[in-house]
Image (cartoon, rainbow, N blue to C red):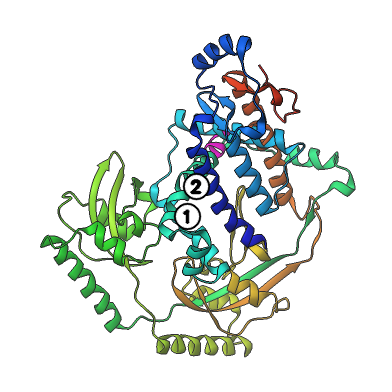
Amino acid sequence: MKVINKLFFGCCSLLLLAVVSVNAERVRYFGSKENAARTNETDSAKEPVINDKSVVDEVIWVVGDEPILKSDVEMTRLQAEADGTKFPGDPDCSIPEQIAVQKLFLHQAALDSITVSEADVSQGIDDQINYWIQLIGSREKLEEYRKMSVSQIRQQMHDDFKNQQLIRKEREQLVKDIKVSPAQVREYFKKLPEDSIPFIPTQVEVEIIAHQPKVEQAEIDRIKNELRDFTKRVTDGETTFATLARLYSEDPGTARQGGELGYTGRGMLDPAFANVAFNLTDPKKISKIVESEFGYHIIQLIDKRGDKINVRHILLKPKVSDAAVKTATLRMDSIWNDIHQKKFTFEQAASYLSDDKDTRNNDGLMSNASETGRTSRFEMKDLPTEIARVVDTLKVNEISVPFTMINAKGKEQVVIVKLKSRIPGHRAAISEDFQVMQNIVLAKEKEKTIHDWVVNKIKHTYVKMTDRYKKCKFEYQGWVK
């Protein structure tokens, strides 16, 4: 039912917007600060009494030059009900306040020249749509339920999703320099009542040995021939690079953008890809075939700007045959047997035999990135799904049988894992869980910084609201001028 509600929300918002557009002449608008002043001069003398039930939509707040509509609040309320989200205090007050805060962040993001690439927006939208498709059963069922095509759904989501990413980046910008010292962490938890000390869920440490099935040469030749054909078709003027990228590229984050990456620095790209891309000088020419960790590419220059480059690319990924997976599984079986016969340890095998570059220099120990650094501890929800499913069945120091998984680069691997340790759920202790406790204190410091910034921003921002909101108890001070 929760899933259905989330899908239903999209339909409701479209219907609501349609009604608003049809009844546009009934919308009350305060507009900018100057318009608001002129409105106040006349409205105080002869503002008509308006029955709320007769108004389809109205401007209820203005933040800077940005209006907040009554329909914005209703749509947010519907989404919250679908997600099971509860707003603090009175939702009639807290919902418009939260929308107003978002507008403050968006305004600041524009001042700070914060940007998000279309590739990132497209990738996020695709991930959400794919999640919905998995839940509802098929693309066709999703389109039937939403009464629109996936392309229309994607277009509808675009602006809101882009704004969410801008807000996230601006918040990160505001707190990027916040740090806490060990003394602050100890002092915070020293004053905390025992029953308020956070509970740490069960955590695990996992070691891994991975083997990449070998791609057959015939498959590599097929991929390269296909990319050469793409190059010829573009060079001959038969089609455009962007069209072929939309049709054939296997990079979901850029394919719908015609393969365009957006302006990107060298450090953000695969080294082999970057070496070729940054040496391109003629937008009319297409690069040679480039092999990266993700597959095989051809690249077309769009523009260079300082130390950043904007290119299009087409990615094709060679398919691993069933025979190759079987061969890799047999090899991992052999390693598993040799470890159990004590010919070498799991850690030695990980260092010398694993294909996983991220872990083999650390005896196979997996690493979990966090805001304050890296740790070897994972909550089960933070592990890759295939690994979590296997680890859940293992005892400490037990080694799994070989199984297949898709790694972060989208490649199929055959792996074995060892459960190095399992730390049962417990109340946090400064000696064992310092990093977790540091994260809690850091989050609180960031929250305080954000809160203080919002309060200060309100002081310097024009805010207008209808009278019925002026008696609200808001989270932030200063809204009522």
**Residue under label 2:** 161
Identify the residue at image location x=56%, y=25%: 63
- Which percent across, then down, holds residue 364? 56, 70
Q: Residue at x 55, y 32 (%)?
A: 103
Assess whether residue 367 is covered by the magenta stretch: no
Q: At label 2, which amino acid type do we have?
A: Phe
Confirm whether the magenta stretch covers residue 173.
yes
Which is nearer the eye, 64 or 312?
A: 64
Q: At which x and y percent is residue 463?
A: 59, 21
Residue at the far left: name it.
236
Task: Determine whether label 2 and label 1 are within 8 Å by CB.
Answer: yes
Query: What type is the residue that disc 1 sits on?
Result: Ile
Report the Cα–Cα distance between label 2 and label 1.
7 Å
Would residue 376 be seen by someone viewing this image from the given angle? no
The image position of residue 149, as x and y in percent, is 43, 60
Q: Which residue is mark 1?
A: 125
The quadrant holding residue 379 is: bottom right
Which residue is located at x 57 percent, y 50 percent? 12
Q: Secondary structure at mark 1?
A: helix
Q: Nearer the viewer, residue 477 or 18?
A: 18
Identify the magenta region.
170-174
Give the class, few, some or many, for how many residues have Cα within 10 Å of label 1's Cα (few <14, many ≥20): many
Q: Is residue 453 visible?
A: yes
- Determine whether the residue tagged by mark 2 lies in a helix, strand or loop: helix
Q: In the figure, 399 relative to 279: above or below?
A: below
**Which of 201/236 is in front?**
236
Q: Which mark is residue 478?
A: none
Using the rendered view, name the quadrant where residue 202 is placed.
bottom right
Query: Residue lying furthest right in this view?
Result: 194
User: How far from the left and from the top, in percent, is residue 139?
Assistant: 47, 68
